Structures are given as C-alpha cells and as structure tokens.
Image (cartoon, grey):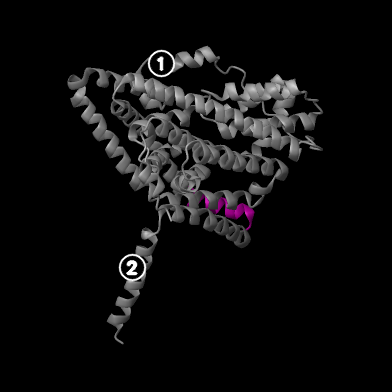
C-alpha cells in the first residue's frame, strides 16, 4: 500500500470522526463535556498537585469557558428585545397578551410555592444543620439597603430605554419591548415596516444562537475542568447532607411538579419534554445563570417543544427574570438548616411563614446583586434568626455555593420551559406534532 493511500485512509478516519461528532445530537455532545471535564480536572490535580493544577486550569482552560459565557451574554439583550417584541406582534391582539402574562405569572408563583415546600420537607428529613459547628467561620455581612418592592416596581420602567439596553437591565428591557410590540400591533400597517425589521432581527439572533451553541460542549468542558482542578471533588461533596437535600429536592421538584404538570395536566409525554430541553439544562448547570441560558432555552422551546414564538419570546424572558424555584427550594432547606444549627424551635406557623416569605420575595429579585443572600436574610429574619446568625450562615455556605447554585439554575430553567409549555398549550399556541416527535436521541 502506498504512502498516499495510507494518508488518504488516515484523512478519511479523521474526517469520519469529525463527521460523527458533529452529526451527534447536541445534547449528547454537551453531556460528554462535564464527564470529560471532571476527568481532566482530576488528572491535572494528580499530575501537578492542587495548586499547580488550579493555576494551569485558570490560565489555560477557564478562558475557553469564559469566552463561551461571554458569547451567550452577548446575545441576551438583543435576543430578549427582538424575540419579545416579535412575540407580542405575533400574538395578534393586546388582550391575548394579558391572558398569557397572567397565566405565566400565576404558574410561576404556584411552582415556587411547591418548591419551597419541598425544600422545607427535605430539610426536615435530612436535618443538615444538626451538629454543625460554626467555629472558625468568618461572618459575611449582608447588604441591608436592598430596594423595597415599590422601588423594584418603579425601576421596571426605564428612565432611558437605550441605557437599559446598554446596561442589561432585563426587567426594563422586557417592559420596553412589550410596549414596542403592542404599539406596532395597534398601528397595524403604519408599524409594519418597523415590525418587519424587528422580526428579521429576531431571526438573525436565533441563527447566531445556533452557531454559539455549537461551542457549548467546549465551554462546558472548560468550566467543569476548571472547577474540578481548582477544588477537586470536594467542591461537589462538601457539606454532603445539605448538598444531598438540595439536589434531591430539586430532582423531586423537576420530576414531580414539572413532569406532573406536563404529563398529567397537559396530557403530553414528560420524557419528550425533558429530552427537548436537555441542551438548556446542560448550559444552565455549567453557567449557573438563567439569563445566560435564555437563548438556548428559547431555541429548545421553539425547535424541540413546538412552542409558538409568541409564547416562547414572552414567557421565557419573564421566567428568566422572576422564576426562582431552585432558589426558593434552597431557602426552604436553609431555613431548616439554620433552625437546626442555632437551636431555633419552629412551629407550624413558622413553616407557613418560611413558605410564604420565600415565595413572595423571590418574585422580581433576580436583578438585585447577591439576590440569594438578600432572600436568605429575609427568610431567616422571619423565623427569628439574628443578623449575626445570618452572617455566619452566609460565611459558612459561601465556599460551597457554586455546585448548589448550578443545580438551582438548572431547576429554574426547567421551570421556565414547563410554564411556557403550559401557557402555549392552554392558548393553542403549540405544535404538538413537533413536541411529540422530538427526535433528540
């Protein structure tokens, strides 16, 4: 056999591998990323030691993950504005927009209440705070100047829409996009030219999203490799009982509440639903950001679940901003954790207060810096924990928050998709043929 033939066969094998890789469904490629990332991180730690492995991963590997996140963030504001405005235009009548919004917000609040209830239940079963010793923990002070509910509502209206777009103020962008969409809808022919431009912009952003998602396996691999090289498996196993309570609680919430909503309320196959949004779940887990995952969630909802752009473009951006089921569940667990650690006796009234406080305060807090810490202070204060005890809790949990936050975000994104599916089904804005024929295998 000639050298030329050998080279040709080698090229064919290489080309076959690349073809096979890119022909593989995206969610499978994304799923491979974390597995290889954990393995690569452990190999680096074994070969170079923890400090050198952390330095190497931070310098040479993490930037690929940061680049992927930056690309996703680049899409957020233009995607939200164009898809939301285009979605409002596609609805056809302003009154229908009110129906969609009311259903979405109502469902988000109901699922949040279920989430915090499951969190309380898991905290009571696992008792993660029993016997916890806070000796040596450095308290972390929590800012007390968080805006009031009235201030949050007023801030939704942007003083300068262009400034809101530039700064990434998502709630303000959502408000302005809805106004633009409604105005175009009511002007009809007069607004058609601008409407066509916005619709074209939405199509362009979805195309760019598809390109960026091809980089997801690399980005996820880089992020997980860095986390593992930096912290080792300890980052996934520290505070084992608390982590087990949060992870199992989130899994139960996803399967029972979201899966139950899709299967028993909507009459749709739940397995198809979960397979259809796996890409978004994988990105949510690796980035710990519902907003950063939003482009992928919208793409999955439209292409895999058959959700009409009018619903996907309006319900999902709203959910990425106000839906915090994972955080609410986490707060339920932490309330029991704190009570057990500090010896606070809880009555049935206290359990009710925890559930109500976590549910109500979670709505609209996504734009607040350190939102989870603010919510923790609010919930623990409601059951009698002192500011000093809350500060100790934050100092104790902060080093282990990353893997817990990853699961909370995955839960939030799954909830966004489930609510969007429910709203689309109720408004007859879903192509069930696409949903039932999800071929993500």
The residue at which mark 1 appears reads as: 157
Q: Quadrant of residue 429?
A: top left
Figure quadrant of the N terminus = bottom left
Nearer to us in this view, 286 or 319: 319
Q: Position of residue 180 (x, y in %)?
A: 30, 21
Residue 59 is covered by the magenta coloring = yes
- The answer to whether 203 appears left or right of 103 in the picture is left
For mark 2, give the secondary structure.
Answer: helix
From the image, give the main secondary structure of the stretch colored magenta.
helix
Nearer to us in this view, 234 or 123: 123
Local crowd size for mark 2, using a 10 Å CA cut-off: few (<14), some (14–19), many (≥20) = few
Residue at 34 percent of width and 35 percent of height: 308
The residue at which mark 2 appears reads as: 15
Q: Which mark is residue 92?
A: none
From this view, report whether residue 318 is shown above or below residue 122: above
Residue 370 visible (yes or no): no
Range of residues picked out in magenta: 49-63
């Amino acid at each position: 056999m000639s050298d030329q033939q050998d080279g040709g066969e080698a090229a064919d094998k290489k080309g076959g591998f690349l073809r096979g890789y890119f022909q593989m469904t995206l969610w499978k490629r994304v799923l491979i990323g974390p597995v290889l990332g954990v393995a690569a991180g452990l190999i680096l730690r074994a070969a170079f030691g923890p400090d050198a492995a952390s330095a190497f991963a931070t310098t040479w590997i993490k930037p690929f993950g940061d680049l992927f996140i930056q690309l996703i963030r680049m899409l957020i504001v233009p995607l939200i504005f164009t898809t939301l405005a285009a979605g409002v235009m596609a609805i056809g009548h302003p009154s229908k927009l009110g129906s969609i919004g009311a259903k979405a917000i109502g469902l988000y609040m109901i699922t949040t209440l279920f989430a915090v209830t499951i969190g309380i239940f898991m905290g009571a079963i696992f008792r993660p705070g029993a016997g916890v010793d806070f000796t040596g923990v450095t308290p972390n002070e929590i800012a007390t100047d968080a805006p009031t509910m009235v201030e949050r509502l007023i801030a939704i209206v942007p003083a300068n829409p262009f400034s809101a777009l530039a700064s990434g103020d998502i709630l303000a962008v959502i408000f302005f996009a809805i106004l633009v969409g409604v105005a175009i809808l009511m002007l009809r022919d007069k607004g058609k030219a601008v409407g066509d431009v916005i619709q074209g912009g939405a199509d362009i952003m979805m195309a760019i999203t598809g390109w960026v998602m091809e980089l997801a396996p690399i980005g996820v691999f880089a992020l997980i490799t860095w986390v593992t090289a930096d912290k080792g498996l300890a980052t996934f196993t520290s505070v084992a009982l608390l982590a087990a309570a949060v992870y199992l609680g989130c899994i139960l919430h996803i399967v029972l509440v979201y899966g139950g909503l899709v299967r028993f309320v909507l009459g749709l196959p739940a397995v198809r639903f979960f397979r259809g949004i796996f890409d978004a779940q994988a990105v949510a887990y690796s980035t710990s950001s519902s907003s950063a995952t939003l482009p992928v969630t919208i793409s999955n909802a439209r292409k895999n679940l058959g959700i009409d752009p009018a619903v996907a473009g309006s319900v999902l951006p709203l959910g990425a901003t106000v839906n915090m089921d994972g955080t609410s569940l986490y707060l339920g667990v932490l309330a029991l954790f704190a009570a057990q650690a500090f010896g606070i006796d809880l009555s049935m009234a206290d359990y009710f207060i925890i559930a109500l406080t976590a549910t109500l305060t979670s709505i609209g807090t996504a734009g607040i810096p350190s939102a989870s810490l603010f919510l923790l202070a609010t919930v623990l204060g409601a059951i009698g924990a002192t500011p000093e005890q809350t500060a100790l809790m934050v100092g104790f949990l902060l080093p282990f928050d990353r893997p817990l936050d990853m699961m909370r975000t995955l839960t939030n994104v799954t909830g966004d998709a489930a609510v969007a599916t429910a709203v689309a089904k109720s408004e007859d804005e879903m192509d069930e043929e696409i949903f039932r024929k999800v071929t993500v295998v």
